[in-house]
Structures are given as C-alpha cells and as structure tokens.
C-alpha cells in the first residue's frame, strides 16, 4: 500500500502561450513547446523554431543541455542534434549504421554520447557522436521500457511492471523501487517522481513508497514539468508556475 499526504503550492505567475504541447524549461529558463509538429523555443523576446517535415512527428525532445538539444523522430528511427538557436548540427539515421538498431528511447549522455534503447536486441547502449560507434552496456532487458529519463551519467527507466532501474555509463545497474500507476510522469532523480493519475498530481518519494498529493488551482492539467523547485502546469494555452512547499 502507498501512504498518502498533501503538500501545498504557492502560485508564482502565469504566461500565455500558443502551443499544443508544453515540454518544459531548461536551466536558462528557455521554455519549449510544440505546435503543428514544430519545435518552439522561447526566452524573453527571443523565439526560435525547428521544423522537419520529412521525418514526421516529433517523439521526444531532450533539452537538458540547451547548447546540444536532441530531437527524436521515432517513426523514422532518426535523431537530430540542434544548437541553442535550433540550428541543425547533426542528423543520426539509425537505419544506416553498420549494426541494425531500432531506437525506442534516446537521450543525451556525457562525453559526446547518446543513451539509447534498441527494441531489436532489448539492450541499452551508448552512441558515440564523434565516430558513430555503438557501445552496448546491458544484456537484453526482461521487460520493455515504458518510460525513461536521463542525466549525463545515468539512464533511468521504468519497465511495464512499473519497476524503476538505473544504469551508469560504466554499466552498473541498480533497482530503485516501484512506482504507482500513472497517466504521465517525470522522474526528478532516483528518489523523487512527480506524476499525474486521473487528473490529480502527486509528488512521490520512491524509497518510502510515499505519495504526497499536490494541491493546485487547475482542475485539468494538459502537461506539467518540474525543475529547480518550480512546478509548471500547462492547460488551455497557459503556463502557470508554482513553488512546491514541502512539509
């Protein structure tokens, strides 16, 4: 059983935007959205766009490094690297590598590499952006990847049983715990996750199996993003920022 409590929030501000999906904000307070399959980046008066019609729908955007943004197009097994003004740096078509891979998950790693999960082998590996080499760091996983998150040195994933694992760039795998059922989720680190379920937001302490219900004014949340103590809620073309007040 998961214990449950409630935590309060303090509303900071609201911003009107024209977007279909709010992705989040980076460490320089640039915020990222998509509309009509175009990636948009906004900060104060600066506005940048990236569009690639031939690759179909954007599946994932990794902006943890604003100078090296990764845009993934799952349908075409292709990733695009962008600079801080959303100019294209490099295109990686995984169909044309020396070894056949079908990428389901991809994220930025350290040392000019990308994390990736391959559905053909069910393995996690590192792709070297300099020489296009693949380095496998796991054997085949028992269950598919349901959700994933990364930082430069670790890749985190939830399997279809909601079991959470992490792997380091050196191949060390840890089992971190189990998460409740969710509709959308963001892993903050190996101890905390924020997730939505049945249109309610929760702050979840993984090690303690402890749920804290997050109180916000919105009755319907399209998407959310948490970083640096700020919880951003997206609904009806508006981003509302909250400060989470932990008990």
Image (tube, helix red, strand yellow):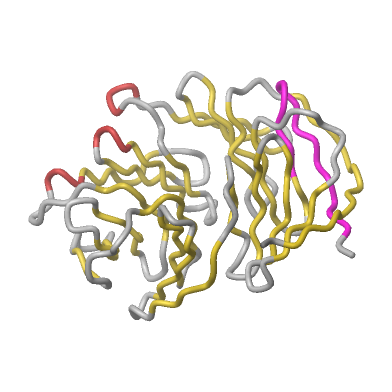
Q: Quadrant of residue 23?
A: top right
Image height of 152 relative to 145, above or below = below
Q: Main secondary structure of the magenta part?
A: strand
Q: Nearer the viewer, residue 5 or 243?
A: 5
**For the view shown, which residue lies furthest in the left direction?**
98
Q: Is residue 198 left or right of residue 144?
A: right
Q: Identify the residue at image location x=91%, y=47%.
A: 10
Let me know if residue 28 is in the magenta part: no
Give the x, y percent position of residue 128.
Answer: 26, 64
Give the x, y percent position of residue 167.
Answer: 40, 73
Q: Identify the residue at image location x=23%, y=65%.
A: 140
Give the x, y percent position of residue 170.
Answer: 35, 80
Q: Which residues are magenta?
A: 232-245
Give the x, y percent position of residue 52.
Answer: 35, 27
For the N terminus, which image quadrant? Answer: bottom right
Q: Quadrant of residue 121?
A: bottom left
Q: Is residue 115 left or right of residue 149?
A: left
Q: Identify the residue at image location x=37%, y=41%.
A: 72
Let me know if residue 233 is in the magenta part: yes
Q: Identify the residue at image location x=66%, y=30%.
A: 222
């Amino acid at each position: 059983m998961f214990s449950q409590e409630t935590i309060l929030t303090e509303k900071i501000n609201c911003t009107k935007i024209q977007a279909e999906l709010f992705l989040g904000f980076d460490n320089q307070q640039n915020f990222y959205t998509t509309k009509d399959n175009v990636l948009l980046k906004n900060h104060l008066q600066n506005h940048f766009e990236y569009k690639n019609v031939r690759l179909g729908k954007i599946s994932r955007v990794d902006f943890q490094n604003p100078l090296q943004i990764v845009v993934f197009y799952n349908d075409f097994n292709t990733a695009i690297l962008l600079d801080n003004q959303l100019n294209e740096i490099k295109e990686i078509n995984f169909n044309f590598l020396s070894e056949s891979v079908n990428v389901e998950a991809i994220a930025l790693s350290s040392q000019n590499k990308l994390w990736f999960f391959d559905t053909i082998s069910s393995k996690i590996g590192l792709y070297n952006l300099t020489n296009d080499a693949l380095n496998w760091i796991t054997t085949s996983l028992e269950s598919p990847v349901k959700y994933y998150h990364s930082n430069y040195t670790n890749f985190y994933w939830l399997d279809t049983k909601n079991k959470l694992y992490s792997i380091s760039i050196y191949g060390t795998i840890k089992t971190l715990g189990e998460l409740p059922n969710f509709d959308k989720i963001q892993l903050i680190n190996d101890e905390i996750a924020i997730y939505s379920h049945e249109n309610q937001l929760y702050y979840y302490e993984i090690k303690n199996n402890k749920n804290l219900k997050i109180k916000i004014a919105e009755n319907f949340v399209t998407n959310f993003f948490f970083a640096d103590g700020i919880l951003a809620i997206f609904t009806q073309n508006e981003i509302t920022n909250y400060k989470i007040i932990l008990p």
